[in-house]
Amino acid sequence: MEQHFTDTIDAGRRIEPRDWMPDGYRKTMIRQIAQHAHSEIIGMQPEGTWITRAPSLRRKAILLAKVQDEAGHGMYLYSAAETLGADRGDLTRKLIDGRQKYSSIFNYPALSYADVGVIGWLVDGAAIVNQVPLCRSSYGPYARAMIRICKEESFHQRQGYELLLAMMNGTSAQRAMVQDAADRYWWPSLMMFGPPDADSPNTAQSMKWGIKRHTNDELRQRFVDMTVPQAARLGVTLPDPDLRWNDERGHYDFGEPDWEEFKAVLSGAGPCNAERSARRRAAHDDGAWVREAALAHAARTRNPPAERIFAATGAPDA
Ligand code: BYC
């Protein structure tokens, strides 16, 4: 069975839910998919705070649609984790109790409306660079979920960039807001790709299993190369004095993110960790009655009371 699994991966074919897989593969897939799902769900919070304060009806409609998409992504991903035997309620409890991670990026605040644009441009931009290769990930349900997610992320990135273009063509105060947001989000966006390869405990095995197709550093470089010309077009300066084109490498050189800050954010000491978790916990508690009502409704639908059957079909003969 192990040979068949290895042959399937080596031939670039997909592992499907009913196929045999090593325990480590299942565990790694559940970890990655759960962290990804949690990121989508927690990721609704920073931008969500701006829905009621959007500057126009058009911006509000776009932002609502985007945040709703993130909820949808979380749902596809929890479903993908369920195909591996994970229990959705259990995953949610692990998120709420702080036993499972979500992306570091969502532990930073969204301080102005320009942050909505910069999150779309940089955070969704980084997400696309990271997730497009995952459409070829070896686990079928995850790879297929990723195709739809990437299409939607692409819309998210464009709406962010379009919003920033509008602001950069506005007043000097608006341009300053965009620059400030880019200054705050640049380094945390680079951290989204994970620790440097030398400090990444999972990359080597995940590459062998075809779960990941590129290393963290490869994707970080790809993101920098893609983003620098976009920043120039916008008229935004990226806050890195070491950022320059390297003709020999055919890539941009860039500075080192503050990995101590990254570790602090992962260990719960980021600017918004406590707030994000508390909000998620409160939403879960406040939603208890919805879950109870849904369960009661499902039970009633499975075993409808006699009077409802008779109302629909007419009373039986005495
Ligand atoms: N934040 O060995 P490594 C989105 C963890 S959602 C937090 O390199 P791996 C969006 C890592 O999980 C964005 N934790 O790990 C949503 C591992 O944890 P364990 C989320 C991080 O898995 C709404 C440990 O550190 N995207 O885009 O090989 C609105 C060691 O790292 C981070 C995904 O989840 C981090 N930044 O590689 C807008 C994509 N980085 O083992 C946008 C799918 C690392 O200690 N995930 N860790 O539990 C992946 O591609 C990979 O899991 C990663 C990490 C590249 C993130």
Image (tube, rainbow, N blue to C red):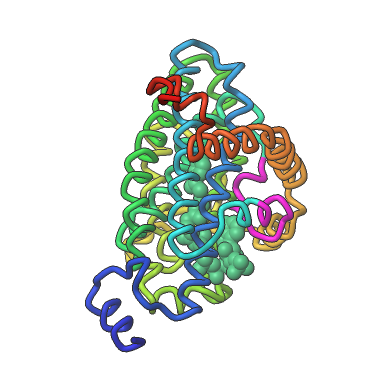
- The stretch of residues the image draws in magenta is 93-108
Position of 265 compared to 146: left or right? right
Residue with the most extreme front position? 318
Image location (x, y in percent) of residue 50: 60, 23
- Asked if residue 102 shows in the view, the reply is yes
- Asked if residue 191 shows in the view, the reply is no
Residue with the most extreme top position? 57
Image location (x, y in percent) of residue 124: 45, 42
Seen at 70% across and 60% down, the residue is 99
Image location (x, y in percent) of residue 125: 42, 44
Seen at 43% across and 69% down, the residue is 215
- The quadrant where ligand 1 appears is bottom right
Q: Nearer the viewer, residue 70 or 132?
A: 70
Q: Indicate yes or no whether the magenta region holds residue 42.
A: no
Give the quadrant of residue 198: bottom right
Is 49 above or below relative to 230?
A: above
Mark count: 0
Seen at 41% across and 31% down, the residue is 161
Position of 62 compared to 261: left or right? left
Position of 233 compared to 52: left or right? left
Image location (x, y in percent) of residue 255: 55, 59
Position of 169 compared to 282: left or right? left
The quarter of the picture where the N terminus appears is bottom left
